[in-house]
Amino acid sequence: MKFLDHLEEWIIASLMGAATLVVFVAVVHRYLSGLPIPVVQDWLIQINTSWAQELCIYMFVWMAKFGAAYGVRTGIHVGIDVLINRLDTPWRNKFIVFGLLAGATFTAIVGTLGANFVWHMAHTDQTSSDLEVPMWLVYLAVPLGSYLMCFRFIQVAVHFIRTGELPKHDHGHVEGLEDEIAAAKGGAA
């Protein structure tokens, strides 16, 4: 399970970093292309970066789908649970499990519809306008991200049924900081 957790985090972080780099390069290119430096301007104008915007859009779509699954796993999705938290514990637990299973069902349906769409899209020659990659690769984010999110809903539901605990995101927590503090105290002693 740790491998899947790390893979999910690695994909999200890599897409964020790559999108930031692509946008930065495209903006710098656009700015420098406007400067009246004869040789440099001519050279930069010949470089086509029209694909950068399309690539960033696709990377953000993939990032959002995998980020949503990450949000379910870590408990960072916003929820309105004022009414649920006012219920007696047995009813509260039933509604929480129902909500988690409803989320799993919904994302399974979206994943299945997305997989069907990708399957049919793969049998066409449709490509993206600037990158000219097959569109089924772009749309593959929908079933993969939705099925991962479905798995995360089920994972949280099973954990809640076993322990009665939901994942709670602590905004002040920095992962790995405890190890560094312990190492610093051990080295200072």
Image: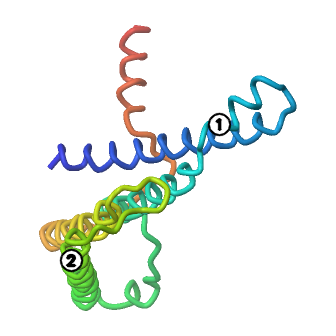
Specify the amino acid type for callout 1: Gln
Nearer the observer, 18 or 85: 18
Above or below, 52 against 140 in this view is above
Quadrant location of the C terminus in the rendered image: top left
The residue at 81%/39% (across/down) is: 34
Residue 89 in view: no
Q: Which residue is mark 1?
A: 46
Indicate the quadrant where residue 37 lies: top right
The residue at 18%/73% (across/down) is: 119
The residue at 43%/69% (across/down) is: 77
Above or below, 58 against 16 in this view is below
Residue 16 in view: yes
Q: Which residue is mark 2?
A: 120
Name which of mark 1 and mark 2 comes first in the sequence. Answer: 1
Residue 99 position, x and y percent, is: 28, 85
Nearer the observer, 165 or 145: 145
Left or right, 47 with respect to 74, comes to: right
Instruction: Label 1, secondary structure: give it.
Output: helix
Residue 85 position, x and y percent, is: 39, 84
Left or right, 183 with respect to 110, comes to: right
Indicate the quadrant where residue 187 lies: top left
Residue 2 position, x and y percent, is: 18, 45
Above or below, 47 against 113 in this view is above
The residue at 55%/38% (across/down) is: 21
Instruction: Label 2, secondary structure: give it.
Output: helix
Above or below, 109 against 69 in this view is below
Q: CA distance from mark 1 to mark 2?
A: 37 Å
